Amino acid sequence: HIFTMAAESQCPRRLGEKFRRAVDVVGGTLPLPPTEFAERAYRHALNPLHNPIREVMLGYGGDVRKTPPMLGVFSDIPWHKLRESEVMAWAKAGFSWVVCDGEHSLQEGRYGREQMAMILRHGITPVQRLHREARSEHGDALTMGARATMMPYGTNVKQAEEYFKSVAYPTTGKATPLDRGGFPMRTGNYDLVFTPDELRAAEVETQGWIQFETSEYILEGPTSSGVLAVMEAQGSGNAVGFVGPFDAVMRSGPSDELSAAIDSLISQAADRGLFMGRVCGSGSCSEPDKIEEAMVTAIKTGCRLICIHYATSDLPYIGAVQAAAPFWRAAEKCGF
């Protein structure tokens, strides 16, 4: 599409076989220099519908194990309290994606167009997490500027199938009540993309993220395999899985079986070309060396979306650089 082509030709990112360090994903240098922020803002102006982490996923040919890991965080900062200086700090420390928690933070975690644009201008992919009953809201969140949404608490394959319908435009003549609604999006100079054909051509970088946090999705082989098959059918870079160990433990209790099943799930997904994320760290794993060890294990298993266990509201105290440090050490230990 013309917008993507313009961004790639005038301000290309350095990805691929020659750039396999985790730091290459964020521009090659930490902390980020002013030139990297300028390039990110420029890319966003050329194509505000761009999805930075999806570009990374495709930039390594869709090969999960060859792709460097990317650091993320969940945001519990209310939409009306979000400041640009905070978003810049996340980017400067090397965060590549943020989940805006509109599930547990309810309406305060549902970010609007201005907040989404602010995050994207800094080269971070915003993922809007929604409640388990959400359907129409997933498409609406993408219209607000989220480049992905997240569905929690699935227990069967049908729910996954229905979710992916809700984040995709209908096939002409074959629409269903679940499909994403049509609404004009805007280009970098605020022009409307106003016809169905223009809209479909422009809005091609959104993703659906499914949370694996129930025993059905983690421990029941046929169900988890079925969900992975549904994700695979969405096409390369369009479906992502995310493991929430805290909810899984709350529901099933801690066990070696659960831990092994999570590792197996992530490894199976990587073998199928599917990117998976997980939280590394917890109340019982809060020391930097233990977090680093957990991240090393996750990366070696095939996990490429590594999430700290702190939320964004913790970062003013913890420090974005300090919270990110175990990730960069873990990535280097794993050859990235």
Image (cartoon, rainbow, N blue to C red):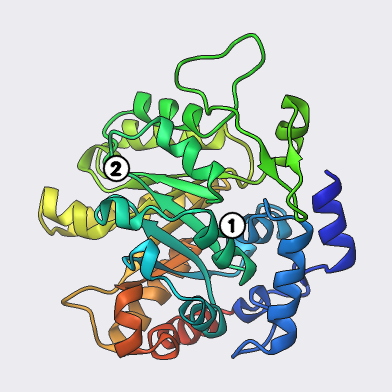
- Identify the image quadrant of residue 13: bottom right
From the image, tell me which residue sits under label 2: 131
Q: Is residue 204 something that shows in the picture?
A: no
| Front residue of 315 and 57 | 315
Q: Residues within 10 Å of mark 1 (few under 14, many from 20)?
A: many
Point out the residue furthest to the right here. Answer: 9
Q: Earlier in the sequence, mark 1 or mark 2?
A: 1
Residue in the image at 77% along x and 69% along y: 42
In the depicted structure, whether residue 182 falls above or below residue 202:
above
Q: Is residue 112 visible?
A: yes
The disc placed on residue 64 is 1
Among all residues in the image, which is located at the extreme left?
Answer: 253
Q: Which type of secondary structure does the marked residue at label 1 adopt?
A: helix
The quadrant of the rendering that contains the N terminus is: top right
| Image-quadrant location for residue 156 | top left
- The crowd level at tag 2 (other Cα within 10 Å; few <14, some 14-19, many 20+) is some
82 vs 264: above or below: below
Image quarter hosting the C terminus: bottom right
**181 or 22, which is in the foreground?**
181
Above or below: residue 224 compared with residue 10: above
The CA span between labels 1 and 2 is 28 Å
The residue located at (89%, 66%) in the rendering is 10
Q: Residue at x 61, y 47 (%)?
A: 237
1 vs 2, front mark: 2
Relative to 220, is 254 above or below? below
Q: Position of residue 219 (x, y in %)?
A: 24, 43
Q: Mark 1 and 2 residues: CB-CB less than 8 Å, in contact? A: no
The type of residue carrying mark 2 is His
Question: Which disc is residue 333 wearing?
Answer: none
